[in-house]
Image (tube, coloured by chain):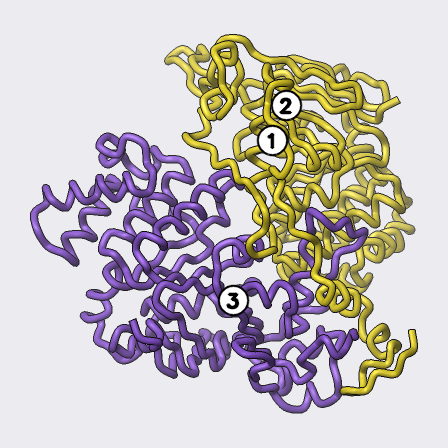
Amino acid sequence: MSASPLIEIKDLRIRFHGDDGRITYAVDGVDLSVANGATLGLVGESGCGKSVTSLAIMGLLPKQSAEISGAIRFDGFDLLKTSDQTLRDLRGNRLAMIFQEPMTSLNPSFTIGDQIVETILRHRGGSRRSARERAIDLLRRVHIPSPERRIDEYPHKLSGGMRQRVMIAMALACDPRLLIADEPTTALDVTLQAQILELMRELKAASGAAIILITHDLGVVAEVCDEVAVMYAGEIVERAPVDELFSAPQHPYTVGLLGSIPRLDHRAEQLATIEGMVPNMAQPPAGCRFAARCPFVLDACTKAPPPLVEVSPGHLSRCIRAPLERLVS
Amino acid sequence: MALLEVDGLVKHFVAERSLFGRALAHVKAVDGVSFSLDAGKTLALVGESGCGKSTVSRLVLRLIEPDAGKIRFEGRDLLSLDAGALRAFRREAQIIFQDPYASLNPRMTVGQILTEPLALHNLAPPARRRERVEEILRLVGLEPRLARRYPHEFSGGQRQRIAIARALAVEPKLIICDEPVSALDVSIRSQILNLLRELQDRLGLAYIFVSHDLAVVKHIADHVAVMNLGQIVETAAADALFAAPNHPYSRALLSAIPVPKPRAKRSRIVLQGEIPSALNPPPGCRFHTRCPYVVDRCRSEMPQLVQDGIGHATACHRTSELPSSEAIVPTDGGFSPVLEKLVAAFSGGPEAVRGSGVSSLGTNPAQP
C-alpha cells in the first residue's frame, strides 16, 4: 500500500437546521485522514461532533435537516457526492460501523443469523447455505460459543457482550477496509470491555482494516489507538500519535481531560476540572472556542480563531500558546 | 461503633410464578452479604452488571425489603422500624441515582425540589426555608438564583449537583451513591467527584459508592467490597485491594481496567465464558465457571470470607495457593513530568498561570 490514506476528510462542515430556523454548527472544518491498517481514536465529550462526523462518513445523516460540505474521500469515491446506490454498496461491505448500544442496533424480530446472512447475500451474493456457513464462521471468529446453535437465536436471548460481538461479526461480514466503532465498549462491564478490545485488536491484526474508534474513554484510547484526534465544539483541537498525546498534550482542553481522570498510580486529593460550559453551537464564539474555559487564555485567543498548526512532527494543536511546555518550564 | 452494620443480607426476587401465584424461580440478587461502614468513610461496592450491588444499596435504605439478614444503623435495628420511624430514618440516609435526568421531577422548580424534604421532615420553619435552599445550593456549587429554574434548564452535571443538594437537604449521615458519575462526561465527572469528596470532609458524610468504574473507586473509596452474583468475594481497604487483589475474580476485574497510558504494563486476565445467570447460580463457588484456578472442591463447596488479620477478607478455597498478585493491576505511571506541571497549571486557573509569570508569551520570569 502506498502512503496515500485510506480515508481522507477535507474541511468537513455539518450544519443542522432546526425546526425553529436555528442553525447548529455541529462540525466545523474537520480534516482527518486514516492510513490503511491504522487505528485513529476520535475523542471528545458529548456534543463535540465526533459521532456526527462518523455518521457523515457512513452517509447516515438526515438529508432534510443536515447541510454537509467538504469532501470525504474513501477508496476512490467522494462519499459526500456518491449516489445512494453506491453508498448502499459500500456500507456493510467496505465500510462498516458498530454502535454503542447493541440492543438497539440489532433487529429484535430476526435471528442474529438472518441478520448476518442478509448482509452477506446483499454484498457478496451466493447461496443462502454458503452465507450461513460464513455467518457461523464469523460468529466463531468473535468467540461466540457454539455458534451453530447461537446463530438461530434472537438478539434478546443474548447478553450485552454477546450482542456486541454479533454486531462486530456483522460488521466484519464482508471484510471491511474501514471499521467505525462508536463507543463500542461503553455499555459493557470492564471484563467484557477487555474481551471486546482484545477482539478488536485481534481482528485488526488479522484483517488489516483501519479503525476509527469514537470514545470518551481515554483509557480505551490509550489501549488500542495509534493516533488520536481530540474534538471540541465541532473542531479538532489536537491531533497526535497516542504516546505524545498522553505524555505531552499540546492543547489546554486535552490537558484538562487528562487531568480529570482518576489515576491508579497517583492519588490526587482533587481532580482537575474544566470549569464552565461548552459554547452554544448555534452561535460559536469568534475566537478560540475553548477560550472561555481556558486557564491559559490571552486576549488574542478571543479575537481570531486559532489555526491547527504542527507543534512537532505529526503533532497538531489548535492553540496559539502551544508548545505548552513553555508555560510551565 | 460502626455507623452501618449489615449482616447476612438476602434478597431473592421472584422471577417466575405458576398459574396460582406460587413462586417457581428466584433471582438470587443478594445472597448473604455482610459489611460495616464507619461514619465519614466511603465503602465502594464493585462488580459486573447484575452482581447485586445496586440491590444491596436499596436494601440498606429499605427501599426494598430484605428476605433475611440484619441492618443496623447507629446500633438501631432498621428492619424493625415502623413506618413513622422509617421515615425519620430517611433523614439520616439518602440516595443519589445514576441518571440525573430521570431522578428529578421535571414539573418542579429546583427550589421546590429542595424545599420538599425540608417540609417533609420539618427541618426549617417555612419562613426560613428559602434561605436554607440557597445555602444548600451554594454548598453544591450552584448559584442561589437558580432555585427558580426547572431541571430541564440544567446540564447533566448541574442536575447531579441538584440531586446531591436534595440528598444534603436533610443533613444525612449516609449517602448512597449509585453510579453517580457514570452518565456524565469526563470533565463533569471530576467536578462531581471533587464535590462528593469535599462534602465528605466538611460534613463528615459516609458514602456507599456503587460503581463499575474501578479507577473512580480507587480514587474515592476507603474500603472496597467486590461482589459476584449476589455475594461479596473479597473486601479490603482500597489501597490494599488495588495493591494485591486476592480473589481470582477481583484480579480479573482489576487487571482489565483501561488506563490512560499507552503500552501500560499489565497482565490482563481475560475471563472466558459468560456471567452465569443469577437465576441459577452455579453450585459451590459462584465464580468457578469462569475461574482460571478452579479445582474440584470449588464446584461443590461454597467458600466463606476469610480474614487475613489486617482486614483483608477473601472467599476463595485457594487463596494461599494462588500465584503472586504482583503486576496484575495495570500501572499507569501517574502523569508524565510535563503533564503533571501542565495539569497543576491548568487547575491553578488563570491566576496561577499569570502569577507564575508565564502569561506573556515566551518570557519566563522566575518568580513562584
Crowdedness of circle 2 by 10 Å Cα count: few (<14), some, many (20+)? Answer: many
Question: Share a chain, discs 1 and 2?
Answer: yes
Q: Look at label 3 and name its amino acid.
A: Val
- For the colour yellow, the matching chain is B
Residue that label 1 marks: B250
Taking A236 as reference, is B206 above or below it? above
Task: Look at the image and tell me in which quarter the N terminus of chain A lies.
Answer: bottom left
Percent of width and height locating residue A240: 54, 71
Q: Look at label 1 and name its amino acid.
A: Ser
Q: What element carries label 1?
A: helix
Residues B133 and B237: in front is: B237
Percent of width and height locating residue B360: 80, 87
Taking A83 as reference, is B33 above or below it? above
Q: What element carries label 3?
A: strand
Mark-to-mark CA distance, 1 and 3: 31 Å
State left or right for residue A70 relative to residue B310.
left
| Residue B324: image tag | none
State left or right for residue B66 relative to residue A220.
right
Crowdedness of circle 3 by 10 Å Cα count: few (<14), some, many (20+)? Answer: many
Q: Can residue A327 be seen in this view?
A: yes
Residue in view at x 44 percent, y 68 percent: A52
Residue that label 3 marks: A228
Residue in view at x 88 percent, y 43 percent: B203
| Chain to which mark 1 belongs | B
Marks 3 & 2, CB-CB < 8 Å contact: no
| Chain to which mark 3 belongs | A
- For the colour purple, the matching chain is A
Q: Nearer the viewer, mark 1 or mark 2?
A: 1
Marks 1 & 2, CB-CB < 8 Å contact: no
Q: Look at label 2 and name its amino acid.
A: Ile
Taking A94 as reference, is B44 above or below it? above
